[in-house]
Image (cartoon, rainbow, N blue to C red):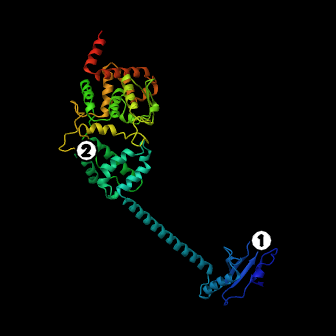
Amino acid sequence: MANITDRAMNGKRGSTDKWLSAVAIWGHGSLVARIPPEGERLFYFRYRNSKGERITHPIGTYGRSGQEGTMTVAEAGQRAQELAGLHKAGIRNIREHLIAEEASRIATREAELTRLAAEKAAAEAEQARHAARKSVRDLFEHWAKVDLINRKDKGVEVRRMFEKDVLPCIGELAVADVKKGHITEVTDALLARGVNRMAKLIFSLMRQMFRFAVDRDLIEHDPSASIRKAKIGGKDVERDRVLTDDEIRDLHKKMPDAGLLLSTEAAIWIALATCCRIGELLSARWEHIDSEKRSWLIPAENSKNGKPHSVYLSDFAVNQFDRIKAHSSDSTWCYPNTDNSGPVCSKTVTKQLSDRQRPIEKKTMSRRSAKPQALLLPGGKWTPHDLRRTGATIMTALGVLPEVAERCLNHTEENKVKRIYQRHSYAKEMAEAWRLLGEHLELLTRSDTESIIMISRSHT
């Protein structure tokens, strides 16, 4: 058997296994190598076990220095010496000993992996706790980017409400520290101002935000979960405010001295004459209004139910749009904002009307109308949405079928069967309803002399 050298290990293969050997190591075993007819060239440590049996134990594959997964002749010799040392120390069953060592190494490695996994889990838990320490303001920004951005106005109105009434109160609190009392502190402040419906709305929005946080494991429990919405400002009271004919006449007389913009005056009459939502009007574009065809298309993106709505414009409504057009700059929008980059805020008209229906204060507040009761009517405070209800009520009083009036309001049919099978458009009936409403408003807003003449003509 030839000695183990690099030259011998790289020698020609034979038709059978060729064995090479090195000098015995301390009489406790020796290094041998095998060159098979094909395949890898292997190193072994040969020794005798406790029973005197000769054992040939594989220790590696031959390869040049630096070649991954192999060992050189010198490295094989060093490994053989290590094994011979075990044999000399009295370990005769080296294979079993090495198997036990390997099992021990595997167990140690598994224990280490378990320890690392536990450390990772602890780190993740700490990260989750750290995330829970985010402030309410941070949570709001996260909610705005993920959820509110999908709303029609990109969350602008919700942000306005939160920045006014929520974030100044609890914005700097850690989300995990928010308790039921913090939430009721926000709603109680709103109730103290007498804006009960706003308190309910903001409570609902806060609940949405905290449930968003629960869904993302930022907190474990929704702090608003144990608060009943019905307890916030009492039960919802359905508004039924409708302006009477006398109040509409009174409004027409009061409006010139209320200090309103001409465009705001026109918005009031258009909302009443078309039964539209004030936000739909303030978002209107001139391209959707055709005075000659007497039509106004409210596109789907502007309507509450997401469906386009075609409005017939009576003479009364056309005149109001013409007033706006005559006094407006060349703009895409009927009600452009200050820099003409888009429509005005949807709350613009509502704020102006509310500002002129408030108690008289000892001193005039800045940025508020100096005429706090200019638009107060005998029936109490009214809003742009009440004009929509008033218009529909007048329609039915003039003989318009309730179903037609509902179509004019662009309400979604609640009955699913009707939605599916009743496809009549009611376009002619709706146009007639808007025409009758316009004529009635024309009569109410004329001077006393003009009204008498029109009434006398209608009876001849």
Residue 215: give its label: none
Q: Quadrant of residue 431?
A: top left
Which quarter shows the N terminus? bottom right
Residue pushed farthest top?
460
- At x 59%, y 79%, the residue is 97
Image-quadrant location for residue 323: top left
Residue type highlighted by circle 2: Lys
Seen from the viewer's position, the closer of residues 182 and 415 is: 182
Q: Secondary structure at mark 1?
A: loop
Tell me what residue is drawn at x 33 percent, y 55 percent: 171
Could you say which quadrant of the image residue 94 lies in?
A: bottom right
Amino acid type for the residue under numbered disc 1: Glu
Q: Earlier in the sequence, mark 1 or mark 2?
A: 1
Which of the numbered marks, if any, corresponds to residue 231? 2
Q: Residue furthest bottom?
A: 26
| Residue 224, visible in the rendered structure | no
Q: Give x and y (percent) for residue 15.
A: 82, 73
* Residue 383 screen position, x and y as percent: 29, 34
Left or right: where does residue 88 sit relative to residue 119?
A: right
